[in-house]
Every structure is written in structure tokens, then in C-alpha cells.
Image (cartoon, grey):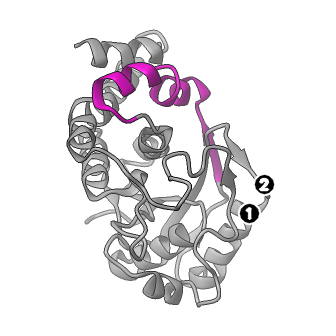
Amino acid sequence: MGHHRAIVEVAGRDSVAAAVAAVNEHGFRELVPTVAFTGTEIGDREAPMRAVATLRTLIGDRTVIHDPIALSDPALWSAMNARCGAEVQRRFGLCSPCLACHLYLHLLRVPLAWSNDNAPVIAGERNTHDGRIKLSQMPEGIDAAIRVLEYGGVELLQPIRHLSGERVSELVGGGWDQGAGQLGCQLSGNYVNFDGTVTYDEEGYRRYVAEYFEPVGRAVIDAWRAEREGAPAADFDAVVRSVLEG
């Protein structure tokens, strides 16, 4: 693939496993760990640093792992996931911030990838979590996120996408349960019914991905490109609104 360096999305077990799998598959000689923030985090703030330390233990003898970089853009998160909520609900019949939040987390890595010769980004999303539905990690959404970053000239690698939880655990040496050892979110479980099930309108979800999720991602990338050419800093509320009104 021509790259010796990759950007790693660091969160918890799955992201560390994805980095290990990507090094195994592509032979990256350098990894740049990144920790992205949304403003909704709760729990142990040192958890991402421990995840980076685990990654160093697992592959540090084969690959240079740089110091982690923190990323956040509260204005972008709000525009994509909060301010537009009522309109998204009216249009598509679903309004969980988790869906576009995952796209936000990928997008945050794009400017850093640009500054690293369009280095690929490694993410730890999976199509299924051993039977549990996660609306933020549905196959259609993952495919759309890959296309959005491709639009920005950045490859979004998903090396554990089709792996079972057992296989993911093996990649990190076992003994690390999914969801453990990572920051939590105040909005976690917002689309889960009290009995643990997840119900949603499949057609509404497909329309959401096609008419909001993917176009918004492309519009954000266009705004950043314009900034690099001298345009004023993007008004992300206006960017999102232009997509919904387009």
C-alpha cells in the first residue's frame, strides 16, 4: 500500500487489536496513536494511555509507536450530533448521536493524516459484536465512513471488522473484555430499550446514511480543504444545515 506510517484510533480493546492486526497485515513501521474526545466522556481518563502502553507491549519491538496525540473539536461534534437532532429525527425517524459521533471520530483524524502524507487510519469497528446490535457500527455505516475518508484521500482500515470477540481477545493476549479498560460515555445506551433490545427503522437508517451521514462527512472535508486554501474557519452548524437543506 506504500505507507510505512499509520494513524491509530485508540479507545479500548478493539482499537488495540485493530492496530496489532494492521501491523501484522501491512507491516507498518510507525504508528501515531490518537485519542479523540467528544466532551461526553466519563470514567478513568488514564485508560487511553494504558491502551497505548498495552499496544507498545504487544508490538513495540516491531514498530515505532509515537507519543499519543489528543484530538477534539467541540463545535464540529455539536453541529453533527446535537444541534441538528430534531431535524434528523423528523427526516429519518431516528436520532441517536452515536451514529454521526463515530463519523466525527474518524473525521478528526483526517487533518492529521493529511499532514502525515495521507497516512491511513486504523479503526477497530466490527460489523457485529457477537450478536449485539450497535447502531454506531452497522455494516452500512462502516462502509459509508470508509467512503467519506476515501473522499478525503485517506484510507480507513478496519482490520478486525469481520472478527469474533474471541479472535479480537486473542490479538491482545486475552483477559481484556470488550468495553473494559476504556472511557465511557454519558450517552451510552441511548438507543437501547430497557429490555436490552434495539429497535429501529431499517429504511430510515439507510436514508440517514445516504442523505445525512455520508454527505455531512464529505461537506466537512470540503470545509477543511477550503480552510487550507485560505478560506475562513468553517461554521460547522452552517455546513450541516446546508446538507439538510440541500
Which of the labelled discs sits on residue 47, or is there none?
A: 1
Label 2 belongs to which residue? 45
Residue at position x 79%, y 60% from top?
46
Residue at position x 27%, y 12% from top?
245
Q: From the viewer's perspective, is residue 239 above or below residue 101?
A: above
Type of secondary structure dominating the magenta stretch: helix
Q: From the viewer's perspective, is residue 44 above or below residue 177?
A: above
Q: From the viewer's perspective, is residue 161 above or below residue 208?
A: below
Task: Locate the C terminus and report the quarter of the image it occupies.
Answer: top left
Q: Nearer the viewer, residue 71 or 184?
A: 184
Q: Callout 2: few (<14), some (14-19), or many (20+) C-alpha neighbours within 10 Å?
A: few
Residue at position x 53%, y 83% from top?
62
1 and 2 marks in contact (CB < 8 Å):
yes
Counting from the top left corner in percent of width and height, residue 236 is at 46, 18
Whether residue 201 appears in magenta in the rendering, the answer is: no
SS at mark 2 in the image: loop
Task: Locate the N terminus and report the quarter of the image it occupies.
Answer: bottom left
Which of the labelled discs sits on residue 76, or is there none?
A: none
Q: Which residues are magenta?
A: 69-94
